[in-house]
Amino acid sequence: MSCCRFQQCSRSLVIAIAMEAEAQPFVDHLGLKPVHDFFPAEAPFHAFQGTHDNCFLTVVTNGKDQVHGTGVDNCGTVPAALATFLTLQKLKGQVDLLINAGTCGGFSSKGAEIGDAFLTTATAYHDRRIPIPPFIPYGIGKVESLSTKQLASAIGAKTGICTTGNSLDMHDIDHLHIQNNDASVKDMEAAAIAWACELHETPHFCVKVVTDIVDGDKPTEEEFLENLHSASKKLQEILPQVIEYVCGKDHSEL
Amino acid sequence: MSCCRFQQCSRSLVIAIAMEAEAQPFVDHLGLKPVHDFFPAEAPFHAFQGTHDNCFLTVVTNGKDQVHGTGVDNCGTVPAALATFLTLQKLKGQVDLLINAGTCGGFSSKGAEIGDAFLTTATAYHDRRIPIPPFIPYGIGKVESLSTKQLASAIGAKTGICTTGNSLDMHDIDHLHIQNNDASVKDMEAAAIAWACELHETPHFCVKVVTDIVDGDKPTEEEFLENLHSASKKLQEILPQVIEYVCGKDHSEL
Protein backbone atom coordinates (compact mmCIF):
# COMPACT_ATOMS: atom_id res chain seq x y z
CA MET A 1 0.00 0.00 0.00
CA SER A 2 3.00 2.28 0.44
CA CYS A 3 3.71 4.50 -2.49
CA CYS A 4 5.67 7.38 -1.01
CA ARG A 5 8.38 8.09 1.52
CA PHE A 6 7.84 10.79 4.13
CA GLN A 7 9.38 13.69 2.21
CA GLN A 8 7.76 12.65 -1.07
CA CYS A 9 4.22 12.08 0.21
CA SER A 10 1.68 14.59 -1.01
CA ARG A 11 -0.04 14.76 2.39
CA SER A 12 0.95 14.28 6.02
CA LEU A 13 -1.93 13.34 8.33
CA VAL A 14 -2.04 12.84 12.09
CA ILE A 15 -4.75 10.61 13.52
CA ALA A 16 -5.20 11.14 17.27
CA ILE A 17 -6.96 8.24 19.04
CA ALA A 18 -7.20 8.27 22.83
CA MET A 19 -7.75 4.57 23.51
CA GLU A 20 -5.41 1.80 22.45
CA ALA A 21 -8.25 -0.67 21.75
CA GLU A 22 -9.64 1.79 19.21
CA ALA A 23 -6.27 2.48 17.58
CA GLN A 24 -4.62 -0.94 17.37
CA PRO A 25 -6.80 -2.59 14.67
CA PHE A 26 -6.35 0.49 12.48
CA VAL A 27 -2.59 0.55 13.07
CA ASP A 28 -2.40 -3.18 12.22
CA HIS A 29 -4.66 -2.82 9.18
CA LEU A 30 -2.43 -0.15 7.66
CA GLY A 31 0.81 -1.84 8.75
CA LEU A 32 2.03 1.23 10.63
CA LYS A 33 5.18 0.83 12.73
CA PRO A 34 5.79 2.08 16.28
CA VAL A 35 8.24 4.99 16.54
CA HIS A 36 9.70 4.58 20.01
CA ASP A 37 11.56 7.89 20.24
CA PHE A 38 8.75 10.01 18.79
CA PHE A 39 7.74 11.45 22.18
CA PRO A 40 10.01 12.60 25.03
CA ALA A 41 10.68 9.64 27.36
CA GLU A 42 8.60 11.31 30.12
CA ALA A 43 5.40 11.27 28.04
CA PRO A 44 3.22 8.14 28.23
CA PHE A 45 2.05 8.43 24.60
CA HIS A 46 2.68 6.19 21.57
CA ALA A 47 3.21 7.00 17.90
CA PHE A 48 2.93 4.77 14.82
CA GLN A 49 3.93 5.85 11.35
CA GLY A 50 3.75 4.62 7.78
CA THR A 51 2.37 5.47 4.38
CA HIS A 52 -0.95 4.76 2.71
CA ASP A 53 -1.84 5.81 -0.81
CA ASN A 54 -0.06 9.10 -1.23
CA CYS A 55 -0.21 9.98 2.48
CA PHE A 56 2.26 9.87 5.34
CA LEU A 57 0.33 8.82 8.45
CA THR A 58 1.12 9.33 12.12
CA VAL A 59 -1.25 7.64 14.56
CA VAL A 60 -0.95 8.85 18.13
CA THR A 61 -2.44 7.20 21.23
CA ASN A 62 -2.46 8.55 24.79
CA GLY A 63 -0.89 5.47 26.42
CA LYS A 64 -1.68 3.95 29.79
CA ASP A 65 -1.87 5.60 33.19
CA GLN A 66 1.20 4.90 35.30
CA VAL A 67 0.97 8.06 37.45
CA HIS A 68 -1.98 6.74 39.45
CA GLY A 69 -1.06 3.10 38.94
CA THR A 70 -4.34 2.16 37.25
CA GLY A 71 -2.99 1.05 33.87
CA VAL A 72 -6.13 2.32 32.12
CA ASP A 73 -6.06 4.44 28.98
CA ASN A 74 -5.12 8.09 29.59
CA CYS A 75 -8.52 9.44 28.57
CA GLY A 76 -9.74 13.01 29.03
CA THR A 77 -8.65 16.47 27.98
CA VAL A 78 -5.25 16.86 29.68
CA PRO A 79 -3.41 13.90 28.08
CA ALA A 80 -5.19 14.54 24.74
CA ALA A 81 -4.05 18.16 24.52
CA LEU A 82 -0.50 17.30 25.60
CA ALA A 83 -0.19 14.41 23.12
CA THR A 84 -1.52 16.60 20.29
CA PHE A 85 0.74 19.55 21.12
CA LEU A 86 3.87 17.35 21.33
CA THR A 87 2.95 15.60 18.07
CA LEU A 88 2.48 18.83 16.15
CA GLN A 89 5.64 20.25 17.68
CA LYS A 90 7.62 17.16 16.63
CA LEU A 91 6.22 17.28 13.08
CA LYS A 92 6.45 21.08 12.99
CA GLY A 93 5.19 22.58 9.75
CA GLN A 94 4.72 19.16 8.14
CA VAL A 95 1.15 18.28 9.12
CA ASP A 96 -1.63 19.07 6.64
CA LEU A 97 -4.48 17.76 8.72
CA LEU A 98 -5.20 16.20 12.12
CA ILE A 99 -8.13 13.83 12.55
CA ASN A 100 -9.32 12.93 16.05
CA ALA A 101 -10.98 9.51 15.84
CA GLY A 102 -12.83 7.66 18.57
CA THR A 103 -16.12 6.71 20.13
CA CYS A 104 -18.67 9.07 21.67
CA GLY A 105 -22.08 9.40 23.25
CA GLY A 106 -24.86 10.58 20.94
CA PHE A 107 -28.01 12.64 21.48
CA SER A 108 -31.21 11.09 20.12
CA SER A 109 -32.69 14.61 20.19
CA LYS A 110 -30.17 15.46 17.47
CA GLY A 111 -30.83 12.31 15.46
CA ALA A 112 -27.93 10.19 16.77
CA GLU A 113 -28.26 6.39 16.81
CA ILE A 114 -25.90 3.76 18.15
CA GLY A 115 -23.27 2.90 15.53
CA ASP A 116 -23.63 6.22 13.67
CA ALA A 117 -20.45 7.87 12.44
CA PHE A 118 -20.32 11.64 12.98
CA LEU A 119 -17.93 14.16 11.47
CA THR A 120 -17.62 17.28 13.62
CA THR A 121 -18.54 20.75 12.45
CA ALA A 122 -17.17 22.26 15.69
CA THR A 123 -16.02 21.30 19.18
CA ALA A 124 -16.72 22.94 22.56
CA TYR A 125 -16.53 22.22 26.31
CA HIS A 126 -19.52 21.69 28.58
CA ASP A 127 -17.64 21.37 31.89
CA ARG A 128 -15.67 24.62 32.01
CA ARG A 129 -18.19 26.93 33.68
CA ILE A 130 -16.51 30.25 34.51
CA PRO A 131 -19.38 32.69 35.17
CA ILE A 132 -17.30 35.87 34.88
CA PRO A 133 -18.34 37.45 31.57
CA PRO A 134 -15.04 37.69 29.66
CA PHE A 135 -14.15 34.14 30.76
CA ILE A 136 -17.43 32.56 29.59
CA PRO A 137 -16.48 32.07 25.91
CA TYR A 138 -13.00 30.94 26.96
CA GLY A 139 -14.58 28.25 29.14
CA ILE A 140 -16.87 27.08 26.34
CA GLY A 141 -13.84 27.07 24.07
CA LYS A 142 -15.70 26.58 20.82
CA VAL A 143 -13.51 25.86 17.78
CA GLU A 144 -14.74 25.29 14.22
CA SER A 145 -13.72 22.04 12.56
CA LEU A 146 -12.50 21.88 8.97
CA SER A 147 -15.56 21.67 6.73
CA THR A 148 -16.10 18.06 5.56
CA LYS A 149 -19.56 18.10 3.99
CA GLN A 150 -18.51 16.28 0.82
CA LEU A 151 -16.60 13.66 2.80
CA ALA A 152 -19.62 13.11 5.08
CA SER A 153 -21.87 12.65 2.10
CA ALA A 154 -19.38 10.28 0.39
CA ILE A 155 -19.03 7.95 3.40
CA GLY A 156 -22.57 8.24 4.75
CA ALA A 157 -21.61 10.02 7.98
CA LYS A 158 -23.76 12.46 9.92
CA THR A 159 -22.37 15.87 10.96
CA GLY A 160 -22.69 17.90 14.14
CA ILE A 161 -21.00 19.61 17.06
CA CYS A 162 -19.02 17.52 19.56
CA THR A 163 -19.14 18.66 23.18
CA THR A 164 -16.26 17.66 25.45
CA GLY A 165 -16.02 17.04 29.19
CA ASN A 166 -13.84 15.00 31.52
CA SER A 167 -16.69 12.83 32.84
CA LEU A 168 -18.21 9.82 31.11
CA ASP A 169 -21.58 10.40 32.77
CA MET A 170 -23.86 13.42 32.37
CA HIS A 171 -25.48 15.40 35.16
CA ASP A 172 -28.17 18.09 34.88
CA ILE A 173 -25.71 20.94 34.85
CA ASP A 174 -23.73 19.23 32.07
CA HIS A 175 -26.93 18.69 30.08
CA LEU A 176 -27.77 22.38 30.22
CA HIS A 177 -24.37 23.37 28.86
CA ILE A 178 -24.45 20.59 26.26
CA GLN A 179 -27.75 21.95 25.00
CA ASN A 180 -26.28 25.46 24.91
CA ASN A 181 -23.46 24.01 22.81
CA ASP A 182 -26.10 22.55 20.40
CA ALA A 183 -24.14 19.31 20.49
CA SER A 184 -24.99 16.12 18.58
CA VAL A 185 -22.28 14.01 20.24
CA LYS A 186 -20.32 14.06 23.51
CA ASP A 187 -16.76 12.90 24.12
CA MET A 188 -13.83 13.41 26.51
CA GLU A 189 -11.07 14.80 24.25
CA ALA A 190 -12.18 16.66 21.11
CA ALA A 191 -12.19 20.28 22.36
CA ALA A 192 -8.75 19.88 23.96
CA ILE A 193 -7.29 18.40 20.78
CA ALA A 194 -8.85 21.23 18.75
CA TRP A 195 -7.20 23.79 21.05
CA ALA A 196 -3.75 22.25 20.56
CA CYS A 197 -4.35 22.15 16.78
CA GLU A 198 -5.34 25.82 16.76
CA LEU A 199 -2.12 26.75 18.58
CA HIS A 200 -0.24 25.06 15.71
CA GLU A 201 -2.60 26.44 13.02
CA THR A 202 -3.27 22.87 11.91
CA PRO A 203 -6.66 22.11 10.26
CA HIS A 204 -8.60 19.42 12.11
CA PHE A 205 -11.89 17.56 12.45
CA CYS A 206 -13.18 14.53 14.35
CA VAL A 207 -14.60 11.17 13.30
CA LYS A 208 -16.71 9.82 16.18
CA VAL A 209 -18.76 6.62 16.32
CA VAL A 210 -21.71 6.52 18.75
CA THR A 211 -21.45 3.88 21.53
CA ASP A 212 -24.39 5.09 23.63
CA ILE A 213 -27.39 7.39 23.62
CA VAL A 214 -26.75 9.94 26.36
CA ASP A 215 -30.34 11.20 26.48
CA GLY A 216 -31.72 7.65 26.44
CA ASP A 217 -32.85 5.28 29.21
CA LYS A 218 -29.64 3.40 30.03
CA PRO A 219 -26.73 4.74 32.11
CA THR A 220 -23.90 5.75 29.77
CA GLU A 221 -21.35 3.44 31.38
CA GLU A 222 -23.54 0.34 30.81
CA GLU A 223 -24.39 1.14 27.23
CA PHE A 224 -20.82 2.29 26.53
CA LEU A 225 -19.34 -1.06 27.62
CA GLU A 226 -22.10 -2.98 25.77
CA ASN A 227 -21.44 -1.25 22.45
CA LEU A 228 -17.76 -0.36 22.65
CA HIS A 229 -16.76 -3.43 20.64
CA SER A 230 -19.25 -2.90 17.80
CA ALA A 231 -18.58 0.85 17.71
CA SER A 232 -14.83 0.19 17.55
CA LYS A 233 -15.51 -2.19 14.66
CA LYS A 234 -17.51 0.50 12.90
CA LEU A 235 -14.65 2.94 13.49
CA GLN A 236 -12.30 0.45 11.81
CA GLU A 237 -14.56 0.39 8.75
CA ILE A 238 -15.09 4.12 8.51
CA LEU A 239 -11.58 5.37 9.33
CA PRO A 240 -9.83 3.81 6.29
CA GLN A 241 -12.61 5.29 4.11
CA VAL A 242 -11.91 8.71 5.62
CA ILE A 243 -8.16 8.36 5.04
CA GLU A 244 -8.71 7.14 1.48
CA TYR A 245 -10.96 10.11 0.68
CA VAL A 246 -8.81 12.71 2.42
CA CYS A 247 -5.46 11.59 1.03
CA GLY A 248 -6.09 12.48 -2.58
CA LYS A 249 -7.80 15.82 -2.02
CA ASP A 250 -7.31 19.45 -1.05
CA HIS A 251 -9.05 20.73 2.06
CA SER A 252 -11.53 22.61 -0.14
CA GLU A 253 -12.64 19.28 -1.64
CA LEU A 254 -13.59 17.84 1.78
CA MET B 1 19.88 39.41 45.63
CA SER B 2 21.64 37.26 43.07
CA CYS B 3 24.41 35.11 44.42
CA CYS B 4 24.67 32.27 41.92
CA ARG B 5 24.54 31.62 38.19
CA PHE B 6 22.32 28.85 36.87
CA GLN B 7 24.91 26.06 36.88
CA GLN B 8 26.27 27.10 40.28
CA CYS B 9 22.99 27.49 42.15
CA SER B 10 22.36 24.92 44.81
CA ARG B 11 18.66 24.64 43.90
CA SER B 12 16.55 25.08 40.80
CA LEU B 13 12.88 25.87 41.46
CA VAL B 14 9.96 26.28 39.11
CA ILE B 15 7.00 28.38 40.25
CA ALA B 16 3.90 27.75 38.12
CA ILE B 17 1.29 30.53 38.36
CA ALA B 18 -1.73 30.43 36.04
CA MET B 19 -2.76 34.08 36.09
CA GLU B 20 -0.54 36.97 35.07
CA ALA B 21 -1.97 39.33 37.72
CA GLU B 22 -0.86 36.86 40.38
CA ALA B 23 2.61 36.35 38.89
CA GLN B 24 3.69 39.84 37.85
CA PRO B 25 4.25 41.46 41.29
CA PHE B 26 6.32 38.42 42.34
CA VAL B 27 8.35 38.52 39.11
CA ASP B 28 8.93 42.26 39.59
CA HIS B 29 9.78 41.87 43.27
CA LEU B 30 12.50 39.32 42.54
CA GLY B 31 13.71 41.12 39.41
CA LEU B 32 13.24 38.07 37.20
CA LYS B 33 13.71 38.57 33.46
CA PRO B 34 11.45 37.29 30.65
CA VAL B 35 12.98 34.47 28.57
CA HIS B 36 11.31 34.86 25.21
CA ASP B 37 12.47 31.65 23.59
CA PHE B 38 11.82 29.43 26.62
CA PHE B 39 8.66 27.87 25.14
CA PRO B 40 8.04 26.78 21.54
CA ALA B 41 6.60 29.71 19.56
CA GLU B 42 3.23 27.91 19.29
CA ALA B 43 2.71 27.86 23.07
CA PRO B 44 1.00 30.89 24.66
CA PHE B 45 3.00 30.63 27.89
CA HIS B 46 5.60 32.94 29.44
CA ALA B 47 8.74 32.24 31.45
CA PHE B 48 10.80 34.50 33.71
CA GLN B 49 14.13 33.53 35.21
CA GLY B 50 16.65 34.80 37.70
CA THR B 51 18.35 33.98 40.94
CA HIS B 52 17.43 34.57 44.56
CA ASP B 53 19.55 33.55 47.53
CA ASN B 54 21.16 30.34 46.37
CA CYS B 55 18.30 29.39 44.06
CA PHE B 56 17.74 29.54 40.33
CA LEU B 57 14.09 30.46 39.78
CA THR B 58 11.85 29.93 36.76
CA VAL B 59 8.38 31.47 37.00
CA VAL B 60 5.94 30.20 34.39
CA THR B 61 2.55 31.72 33.52
CA ASN B 62 -0.09 30.32 31.18
CA GLY B 63 -0.43 33.42 28.99
CA LYS B 64 -3.56 34.83 27.40
CA ASP B 65 -6.18 33.12 25.29
CA GLN B 66 -5.80 33.91 21.60
CA VAL B 67 -7.43 30.70 20.31
CA HIS B 68 -10.93 31.85 21.26
CA GLY B 69 -10.11 35.53 20.96
CA THR B 70 -11.03 36.36 24.56
CA GLY B 71 -7.63 37.60 25.77
CA VAL B 72 -8.31 36.24 29.27
CA ASP B 73 -5.78 34.19 31.23
CA ASN B 74 -5.47 30.57 30.06
CA CYS B 75 -6.87 29.08 33.27
CA GLY B 76 -7.86 25.46 33.81
CA THR B 77 -6.20 22.08 33.61
CA VAL B 78 -5.25 21.80 29.94
CA PRO B 79 -2.97 24.86 29.64
CA ALA B 80 -1.59 24.21 33.16
CA ALA B 81 -0.51 20.65 32.37
CA LEU B 82 0.95 21.63 29.00
CA ALA B 83 2.91 24.58 30.45
CA THR B 84 4.26 22.40 33.25
CA PHE B 85 5.25 19.53 30.96
CA LEU B 86 7.03 21.84 28.50
CA THR B 87 8.83 23.63 31.36
CA LEU B 88 10.11 20.41 32.92
CA GLN B 89 11.08 19.08 29.49
CA LYS B 90 13.01 22.28 28.74
CA LEU B 91 14.80 22.17 32.13
CA LYS B 92 15.19 18.39 31.93
CA GLY B 93 16.85 16.89 34.99
CA GLN B 94 17.61 20.32 36.46
CA VAL B 95 14.51 21.03 38.54
CA ASP B 96 14.61 20.18 42.24
CA LEU B 97 11.10 21.33 43.06
CA LEU B 98 8.00 22.79 41.41
CA ILE B 99 5.66 25.03 43.38
CA ASN B 100 2.20 25.82 42.01
CA ALA B 101 1.13 29.16 43.46
CA GLY B 102 -2.22 30.87 43.10
CA THR B 103 -5.60 31.67 44.58
CA CYS B 104 -8.32 29.17 45.46
CA GLY B 105 -11.72 28.66 46.99
CA GLY B 106 -11.75 27.42 50.59
CA PHE B 107 -14.13 25.21 52.59
CA SER B 108 -15.26 26.65 55.91
CA SER B 109 -16.13 23.07 56.93
CA LYS B 110 -12.38 22.38 56.78
CA GLY B 111 -11.43 25.56 58.65
CA ALA B 112 -10.63 27.75 55.65
CA GLU B 113 -11.04 31.52 55.93
CA ILE B 114 -10.62 34.24 53.32
CA GLY B 115 -6.95 35.26 53.08
CA ASP B 116 -5.64 31.97 54.50
CA ALA B 117 -2.56 30.48 52.88
CA PHE B 118 -2.72 26.71 52.35
CA LEU B 119 0.09 24.31 51.48
CA THR B 120 -1.19 21.16 49.78
CA THR B 121 -0.78 17.67 51.18
CA ALA B 122 -2.26 16.17 48.00
CA THR B 123 -4.18 17.11 44.85
CA ALA B 124 -7.12 15.37 43.14
CA TYR B 125 -9.86 16.03 40.56
CA HIS B 126 -13.56 16.39 41.33
CA ASP B 127 -14.85 16.74 37.75
CA ARG B 128 -13.50 13.57 36.12
CA ARG B 129 -16.33 11.11 36.88
CA ILE B 130 -15.72 7.86 35.00
CA PRO B 131 -17.98 5.26 36.70
CA ILE B 132 -16.27 2.19 35.25
CA PRO B 133 -14.37 0.62 38.18
CA PRO B 134 -10.75 0.60 36.92
CA PHE B 135 -11.17 4.14 35.61
CA ILE B 136 -12.49 5.60 38.89
CA PRO B 137 -9.11 6.20 40.60
CA TYR B 138 -7.68 7.45 37.30
CA GLY B 139 -10.49 10.01 37.11
CA ILE B 140 -9.91 11.15 40.69
CA GLY B 141 -6.22 11.33 39.89
CA LYS B 142 -4.99 11.82 43.44
CA VAL B 143 -1.30 12.68 43.80
CA GLU B 144 0.56 13.27 47.08
CA SER B 145 2.35 16.58 47.44
CA LEU B 146 5.85 16.88 48.88
CA SER B 147 5.54 17.00 52.67
CA THR B 148 5.92 20.60 53.90
CA LYS B 149 4.84 20.45 57.55
CA GLN B 150 7.83 22.39 58.87
CA LEU B 151 7.48 25.03 56.19
CA ALA B 152 3.74 25.41 56.97
CA SER B 153 4.52 25.85 60.63
CA ALA B 154 7.33 28.34 59.92
CA ILE B 155 5.21 30.63 57.73
CA GLY B 156 1.87 30.16 59.50
CA ALA B 157 0.14 28.36 56.63
CA LYS B 158 -2.64 25.79 56.93
CA THR B 159 -2.37 22.44 55.14
CA GLY B 160 -4.87 20.33 53.25
CA ILE B 161 -5.92 18.64 50.04
CA CYS B 162 -6.59 20.74 46.94
CA THR B 163 -9.36 19.53 44.64
CA THR B 164 -9.23 20.62 41.00
CA GLY B 165 -11.93 21.17 38.38
CA ASN B 166 -12.35 23.27 35.24
CA SER B 167 -15.31 25.27 36.58
CA LEU B 168 -15.12 28.25 38.92
CA ASP B 169 -18.55 27.49 40.37
CA MET B 170 -19.60 24.37 42.30
CA HIS B 171 -22.70 22.28 41.65
CA ASP B 172 -24.13 19.49 43.80
CA ILE B 173 -22.37 16.73 41.91
CA ASP B 174 -19.05 18.59 42.28
CA HIS B 175 -19.67 19.03 46.01
CA LEU B 176 -20.17 15.30 46.47
CA HIS B 177 -16.86 14.48 44.78
CA ILE B 178 -15.07 17.32 46.59
CA GLN B 179 -16.23 15.84 49.89
CA ASN B 180 -15.04 12.40 48.77
CA ASN B 181 -11.67 14.01 48.05
CA ASP B 182 -11.65 15.40 51.64
CA ALA B 183 -10.58 18.74 50.18
CA SER B 184 -9.81 21.92 52.13
CA VAL B 185 -9.39 24.10 49.03
CA LYS B 186 -10.58 24.09 45.41
CA ASP B 187 -8.76 25.38 42.33
CA MET B 188 -8.62 24.94 38.55
CA GLU B 189 -5.05 23.71 37.92
CA ALA B 190 -3.31 21.86 40.78
CA ALA B 191 -4.12 18.23 39.89
CA ALA B 192 -3.10 18.73 36.27
CA ILE B 193 0.20 20.34 37.27
CA ALA B 194 0.83 17.49 39.72
CA TRP B 195 0.27 14.94 36.93
CA ALA B 196 2.84 16.65 34.67
CA CYS B 197 5.31 16.80 37.60
CA GLU B 198 4.82 13.09 38.29
CA LEU B 199 5.61 12.26 34.65
CA HIS B 200 8.92 14.07 35.15
CA GLU B 201 9.46 12.66 38.65
CA THR B 202 9.71 16.22 39.97
CA PRO B 203 8.71 16.87 43.61
CA HIS B 204 5.93 19.43 43.91
CA PHE B 205 3.45 21.15 46.21
CA CYS B 206 1.04 24.08 46.01
CA VAL B 207 0.75 27.40 47.83
CA LYS B 208 -2.86 28.61 47.56
CA VAL B 209 -4.45 31.72 49.09
CA VAL B 210 -8.21 31.63 49.72
CA THR B 211 -10.25 34.23 47.75
CA ASP B 212 -13.72 32.87 48.56
CA ILE B 213 -15.57 30.44 50.80
CA VAL B 214 -17.10 27.86 48.48
CA ASP B 215 -19.49 26.45 51.10
CA GLY B 216 -20.53 29.95 52.22
CA ASP B 217 -23.46 32.20 51.29
CA LYS B 218 -22.07 34.20 48.40
CA PRO B 219 -21.67 32.94 44.81
CA THR B 220 -18.01 32.08 44.17
CA GLU B 221 -17.65 34.48 41.23
CA GLU B 222 -18.80 37.49 43.32
CA GLU B 223 -16.60 36.73 46.30
CA PHE B 224 -13.70 35.76 44.02
CA LEU B 225 -13.70 39.14 42.26
CA GLU B 226 -14.19 40.97 45.59
CA ASN B 227 -11.18 39.34 47.24
CA LEU B 228 -8.88 38.61 44.30
CA HIS B 229 -6.86 41.76 44.91
CA SER B 230 -6.30 41.19 48.64
CA ALA B 231 -5.63 37.48 48.13
CA SER B 232 -3.10 38.28 45.41
CA LYS B 233 -1.45 40.69 47.86
CA LYS B 234 -1.30 37.95 50.49
CA LEU B 235 0.23 35.64 47.90
CA GLN B 236 2.92 38.25 47.27
CA GLU B 237 3.76 38.28 50.96
CA ILE B 238 3.76 34.53 51.46
CA LEU B 239 5.48 33.40 48.26
CA PRO B 240 8.86 35.10 48.97
CA GLN B 241 8.75 33.54 52.46
CA VAL B 242 8.22 30.12 50.89
CA ILE B 243 11.09 30.65 48.44
CA GLU B 244 13.35 31.91 51.20
CA TYR B 245 12.63 28.87 53.37
CA VAL B 246 12.83 26.32 50.57
CA CYS B 247 16.03 27.59 48.96
CA GLY B 248 18.38 26.74 51.77
CA LYS B 249 16.97 23.33 52.65
CA ASP B 250 16.73 19.71 51.57
CA HIS B 251 13.27 18.30 50.82
CA SER B 252 13.40 16.37 54.11
CA GLU B 253 13.65 19.66 55.99
CA LEU B 254 10.40 21.03 54.49
Image: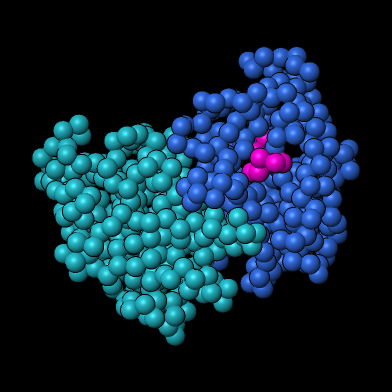
Chain colours: A cyan, B blue
Q: Is residue A180 left or right of residue A212?
A: right
Whether the magenta-drawn stretch holds residue B18 is answered as: yes
Residue B10 at x, y percent in the picture = 71, 20
Taking depth in this image into account, of B87 and A205 the one nearest to the observer is A205
Residue at 49% in and 37% down: B43
Residue at 47% in and 47% down: B67
Taking depth in this image into account, of B228 and B164 the one nearest to the observer is B228
State which quadrant residue A150 falls in: bottom left
Task: Give the quadrant of the N terminus of chain B.
Answer: top right
Vertical arrangement, residue B167 with respect to residue A95, above or below: below
Whether the magenta-drawn stretch holds residue A126 is answered as: no
- For the image, the number of numbered tags is 0
- Magenta range: B15-22
Taking depth in this image into account, of B99 and A199 the one nearest to the observer is A199
Residue A248 showing in the rendered view? yes
Residue B185 showing in the rendered view? no
Task: Give the quadrant of the C terminus of chain B.
Answer: top right
Residue A176 at x, y percent in the picture = 53, 74
Vertical arrangement, residue A229 with respect to residue A246, above or below: below
Residue at 39% in and 76% down: A107
State which quadrant residue B97 falls in: top right
Q: Is residue B88 left or right of residue B156?
A: left
Residue at 60% in and 30% down: B47
State which quadrant residue A215 falls in: bottom left
Residue B14 at x, y percent in the picture = 65, 32
Residue B236 at x, y percent in the picture = 80, 37
